[in-house]
Image (tube, coloured by chain):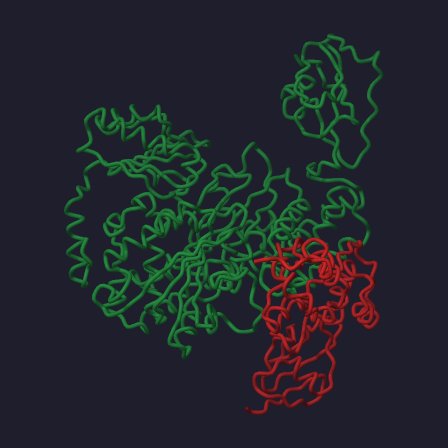
Amino acid sequence: MSEIILQIDGKEVAAREGMTVLEAAREAGISIPTLCHHEKLEPYGACRLCIVELESRGSTRLVVSCLYPVEKNLVVRTRSEKVDRIRKTILELLLAHAPDAFELQDLAQEYGADRNRFEKEPSFCVHCGLCVRYCAEVKKKYAVGFVDRGTRREISFIPEIASKECWNCKECFPLCPTEALQAAFVLTKALAFPPPSSAPAQAE
Amino acid sequence: MARINSSAELEEFRKDILSERDPNKPCISICAGAGCIASGASEVIAAFNAEIEKQGLKADVNTKGTGCPGFCERGPVVVIYPEEICYLQVKPEDVPEIVSQTIKEKKVVERLLYVDPNTGEKATRESDIPFYKNQERVIIGSNIKIDPKSIDDYLAIGGYSALDKALFQMTPAQVLEEVKKSNLRGRGGAGFPTGSKWEGSRNAPDEIKYVIVNADEGDPGAFMDRAVLEGNPHSVLEGLIIGAYAVGACEGYIYVRQEYPLAVENVNLAIKQAEEYGFLGKNILGSGFDFKVKVHQGAGAFVCGESTALMTALEGRAGEPRPKYIRSNIKGLWNRPSVLNNVETWANVPLIINKGADWFTQLGTESSKGTKIFSLVGKINNTGLVEVPMGMTLRDIIYKIGGGIPGGKKFKAVQTGGPSGGCIPEELLDLEVGFDELTRAGSMMGSGGMIVMDEDTCMVDVARYFLEFLTDESCGKCVPCREGIRQMLRILTNITKGKGKEGDIELLEELAETAKEAALCALGKSAPNPFLSTLKYFRDEYEAHIKEKRCPALSCKELIAFYIDPEKCRGCTTCSRKCPSEAIVGGKGLIHVIDQEKCTKCGTCFEVCPPRFRAVKKISGEPVPDPIPEEARTIVRGSKENE
């Protein structure tokens, strides 16, 4: 693997081919905020918080660092007036759904995001997809998925799978940046799981 | 039918088809496109067949249900060859007369001809009608000449000769070179140079490559691709096969929306016929080139028109855009090089190969070559599909071809490019249509939707409408689109309801920037365009809604009121009888008064008030005058001037 030298926030950073800008930055100790990113999972590019500014041939453009591959001589700025403004708006949009999520609150403080900017509509889920992707990519169980699309999109456990797989796993719970996942699980459990103590062994 | 195994066999076969066809034998072409079918074309076709049988003319005349020739406003359209006599709005009861007069006696049925509303002049031939005369119909012009279900019809007008030329007289590199030289740009939206896209795939090292037709046309009011795929499916297929040959693909897909059942039916039939004839499959025309095509029906998601979402859907997964910074012509469907072009783009390819890039580049502007099909809809006299050379002005399209605005209303704006496009105001009507020209004006070419709006259209409401559509169609994956445009819609809805606040415009601008800069795919990135372009050209309307709670177009229901002018009301009772919510108090000879509490603002009173009185007024941004006291409502019939 050949080494690629790029510049992030004025600092020369050595990266390997195939790495993303986010990986290169983190390796060099430069922090970029993310919500939907996880080292074990395929990059997803949904929260757009990790947006950074690229400079090449005199013009600048915005890309998301979790997906953008490192290139030789790339000039990256992880903070700029525009980047910060966009991150602030994204956070405010998400805070309307999950005003009390700790991860969001910390970031909100850093970017001056106002949690009351948009009318509150607590659904808790910020659609980062960590649970869905972890269950599919790491556990290969597909017990939780997205249903519907657009603004009606939500996460949902699939009772037939969840009642078999989730009870002893729950590895997705700590990944959730809000409480939404646990709530969805509790709901599914109440509706579809037989209580373990009282459930008689069912004859197949 | 035996497969055609060589270039010579193809020409022999074509000669056979033509020799069996007498060009002087009358042929009645009836548009069987979606628009005309909706206005009763199927019944007209049945009536022609029955009448011809009845009059014993079966051997002397052909009938044909064809694809859409574009003049949907006046459908069902019937064209009689060889004279090319064009009858409009034909009903089954007109059929006996047409058969006895035009077919038997060679006489024209005057009452079914096009009449120019301005000059009163009649046009007998299709090409004399101003709607058609000002067009350049290189693609859609063939529709009326062929039965889309007949491959022989396509062969009779020279079909598959471009494929023959490409396979036997050109190398794949030469085909690519010709397309590059033509400067053909993608007709689906972004206007990316087709040749460059092909070249990227061709040069990619993978063995397996794909070519794909994007027929997921989903813009409100757009039906160009539908008309081409329904009306001339072989032209798209021929373009696709030529593209596959140039790129080195052996498999192709047609992604067509399920909501277009006739397109699905016709294109499936076309594939079957092309396989039988040897235009598809192994060793096409004996050239050694193999290529097969499959049809994939979309499940009704607008976002699947986006290239990577379309490919994800083709792979059998939920149609969401792929978050990668790599072009799909390098890594697309199943991570293989994949050339995705729109229906109309593919249909241009056989023309370019047959007539040459030099012919193609004669049409159009410096940076946009060839023609473009637009679906001209909205407040326009001649609704339909129009194909014009790039560079024609919006004014010519709307007035010369479209026949202007109905009802003597004033033109306000034209929306181009679908939900991702923008609104262009009157002062820019002399803009020449082209990819870059429209983008510079804050709109875009898109796939060619053109919605004309008159003075009664509220531009804030237009922005709200398109954002509502996009909110519904967003896949919901990324935050700037799912959440950002949802908030934009909420603010715009509030503004149209009179709940706009100081600072709303700035907040909308901020959300627009976030979506434009940070959204994952083109749907989200262009979603703010309807807002941004209406703000750019009609800022005063936004301000009137927010500051004065006034809708200048008198369109937003919650900002208007209906009021009967006591000076003008003659007590005819028409409005009170028609009012569906019994909100009008009055009686014969009494001045009528609208009970504002009961009024649902349906506008019925405004429409039914006799034009000689015009007593009902729409008002906005001002208080409704107090009703006159009951004792003063009796109309004194002193003067008869208004009666």
Residue B456 placed where, x, y %? 64, 37
- Where residue B61 sits: x, y (%)? 21, 34
Q: Position of residue B250 (x, y in %)?
A: 34, 68
Residue lying at 31% horizontally and 65% vertically, measured from the top left: B291
Q: Residue at x 73, y 12 (%)?
A: B587
Vertical relation: A134 (above or below) B413: below
Quarter of the image where the C terminus of chain B is located:
top right
Q: Quadrant of residue B116?
A: top left
Q: Is residue B527 left or right of residue B189?
A: right
The answer to whether residue A198 is left or right of residue A99 is left
Instruction: Chain letter for green, please.
Output: B
Give the answer, above or below, for where B478 lies relative to A40. above
Rendering coords of residue B39 (x, y %) = 43, 33
Chain identifier of the red chain? A
The reply to whether residue B84 is in sight is yes
The picture quadrant where one finds residue B487 is bottom right
